[in-house]
Image (spheres, grey):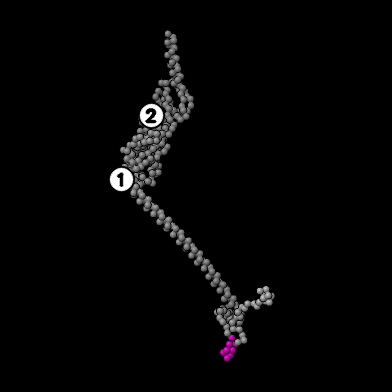
Amino acid sequence: MKLIIFIPLGLLVAAALFTSVYTVDESEQAVIETFGQVEEGIITSGLHFKMPWPVQNVRKFSKETFSLQFGYEEVDGEVTKEFPEDTKMITGDENIVLADMVVQWKITDPKAFLYATNDPKQILYNATSASLRGIIGTSTIDESLTSGKAEIEAEVRDLLVKLIEEYDIGVSILAVKLQDVDLPNKEVRRAFTKVTDARETMNTKINEAKKYSNKQKEEAEGEKDAVMSRAEGDKAARIEKARGDVATFNALYSEFTKQPEITRERLVLETLDEVLAEAEIYIMSDEGGTLKYLPIRPAEAKPAPAQEGDKKNE
């Protein structure tokens, strides 16, 4: 009889001890529930003790980063499902685009994640849809498909973070990434591609024209600077020459005031020498004939006569 009583007691004690000891892995976080009420604080990794079940219970959560795939489902790197109705949106200029997104998130408040809502993941999905639709709805189709994607991502992240903080569902947004923004059918895509190509060609031509214009301006500026430098040089040279002429005139005038007749004759002779430098001068007799006994032209250079010794050497 006693054995029958001790066996259940032993099993009860063993169960109590077994449910009182628990471990939390490095990649996990945990909270304690006491009669269904979550205790304050987050249990970190290691070996821990609690009151046996059903008094206290342990709820563990992963500390890893989760990915929410908006508009599609992906398994092992391959898309298994698509939800085009979720991704179909209207831009600010009333065009239809298909946009899907990945949201990186993690659990930061296990208590709120457990009890703030029945399905926090669905709330996160809905908030992502609302944020993306709101930002796409204020953007043009060009911004959505081309150059505005980075700005759209940043605005969606800011709006999504604000919504999740207001909902207080115990998660934090780490990053958002637009996976794809496309047009709904092939004909529209083809037409938009042509428009985009034409715009790129236009931008290329504009850039080439600007480059040529800048080159011509630089060359013109360089030529202008060269002309200005030459003009400044000519100006300085003429000023110096004028100063020299003034100094010469002043010196002559000073000499002229001292000896007018001598200075006048000297100026006449210097002027004749300068004017008639290349002229041939003839000396005439009173009868009008040329004086034969004076050379009338400079003697031409004649070769030196050969020496006798040189002749013998030849």
As shown in the figure, which amino acid type bears the numbered disc 2? Tyr
Q: Which of marks 1 and 2 is in front?
A: 1
Quarter assignment of residue 35: top left
Q: Mark 1 points at which residue?
A: 187
The residue lying furthest to the bottom in this view is 287
Mark 1 or mark 2: whose residue is earlier in sequence? 2
| Residue 82 position in % (x across, y down) | 34, 36
Residue 106, numbered circle:
none
Residue 115, numbered circle:
2
Give me the residue at 68% from left, 77% from top: 308
Give me the residue at 61% from left, 82% from top: 262
- Classify the position of the C terminus by image quarter: bottom right
| Residue 146 position in % (x across, y down) | 37, 46
**Pointers 1 and 2 in contact (C-beta within 8 Å):** no
* Residue 166 appears in view: no
Q: Which residues are drawn in magenta? A: 283-291
Magenta stretch secondary structure, dominant: loop
Which structural element holds mark 2? helix
Q: How crowded is mark 2: few (under 14 residues within 10 Å), some or many (20 or more)?
A: some
| Residue 273 position in % (x across, y down) | 57, 79
Q: Which of 183 and 285 is in front in this view?
A: 285
Horizontally, residue 264 falls left or right of residue 129, namely right
Give me the residue at 43% from left, 16% from top: 12
Which structural element holds mark 1? helix
Q: Is residue 55 shown above or below 75?
A: above
Magenta span contains residue 73: no
Give me the residue at 45% from left, 20% from top: 18
Q: Which of 141 and 5 is in front in this view?
A: 141
As shown in the figure, which amino acid type bears the numbered disc 1? Glu
Q: Which of 182 and 132 is in front in this view?
A: 182
Q: Residues within 10 Å of mark 1 (few under 14, many from 20)?
A: few
Quarter assignment of residue 159: top left
